[in-house]
Amino acid sequence: MGSPEVRGVTSADEESAISTIVIAFASDPVARWCWRDPRQYLDAMPDFARAFGGRAFMHDAAHCTGDCTGAALWLPPDVHPDDAAIGAVLERTAPPSLLADLDAVFERMSAFHPKEPHWYLPLIGVDPAHQGKGFGSALLSHALAQCDRDHLPAYLESTNPRNISLYQRHGFESLGTIQVGQSPPLTPMLRKAR
């Protein structure tokens, strides 16, 4: 069996791509720290995913496997998450006791971003029923080929320690740890330009 097909997300696929991200992050340590209650998570995560990575749709930088079993939302150089929308989603949905820590986490995330132009991967996920079948690797390889054509670095934050080895296999290196208050650790990771 060959590598899974990866293609651009069409407007008809956007909801499927967001749904894949939502189900993929259902057991993510950081997402579930933010929204412990399953109903809160299911209500908030689609809006958060659109605010955090949704600009990928406007820049032809959202990719999925053939049937949207996996999805990756990349932001090209000089395109950033919608900070105002992220703040609004968190204010509306996160427990008030976490808001100060969440603000501090996002500030630290920002501090780790490369200063030079780079591709940023805010969100990548594979339906848990299909994890371990190469979908995540295929999505990463597809986008990293573009990074290499552009001779630009790629940056991400791993919110799940289980995924760090996958990113390392694709050339990402840890830059440190982000942890505030009771938050689970996030690992900012950089793949240097090639």
Image (spheres, grey):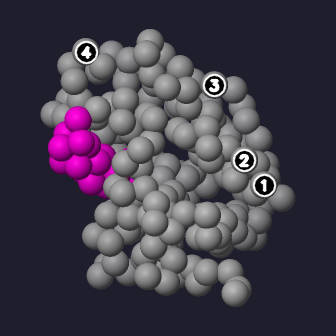
Q: Position of residue 28 (x, y in %)?
A: 45, 42
- Residue at the (27%, 54%) spot, across then down: 46
Which quarter shows the C terminus?
Answer: bottom right
What span is in magenta?
37-54
Q: CA distance from mark 3 to mark 1?
A: 19 Å
Which quarter shows the N terminus?
Answer: bottom right
Q: In which quarter of the view is residue 144 placed?
A: bottom right
Decide whether residue 151 is among the magenta residues: no
Residue assigned mark 3: 177
Tags 3 and 1 touching, CB below 8 Å: no
- The answer to whether any part of residue 116 appears in the image is no
Q: Secondary structure at mark 1?
A: helix
Q: CA distance from mark 4 to mark 3?
A: 22 Å
Q: Secondary structure at mark 3?
A: loop
Tell me the kind of residue under disc 1. Answer: Arg
Q: Which mark is residue 165?
A: 2
Q: Is residue 8 above or below residue 71?
A: below
Q: Position of residue 113 (x, y in %)?
A: 60, 37
The residue lying furthest to the right in this view is 194
- Which numbered disc flags the more N-terminal residue, 3 or 2? 2
- Which numbered disc flags the more N-terminal residue, 4 or 3? 4
Residue assigned mark 1: 169
Tags 3 and 2 touching, CB below 8 Å: no
- The answer to whether any part of residue 140 appears in the image is yes
Q: Main secondary structure of the magenta part?
A: helix
Q: Is residue 134 above or below residue 52?
A: below
Number of other residues with Cα within 10 Å of mark 3, as a class: few under 14, some 14 to 19, many 20 or more = some
- Which numbered disc flags the more N-terminal residue, 2 or 4? 4
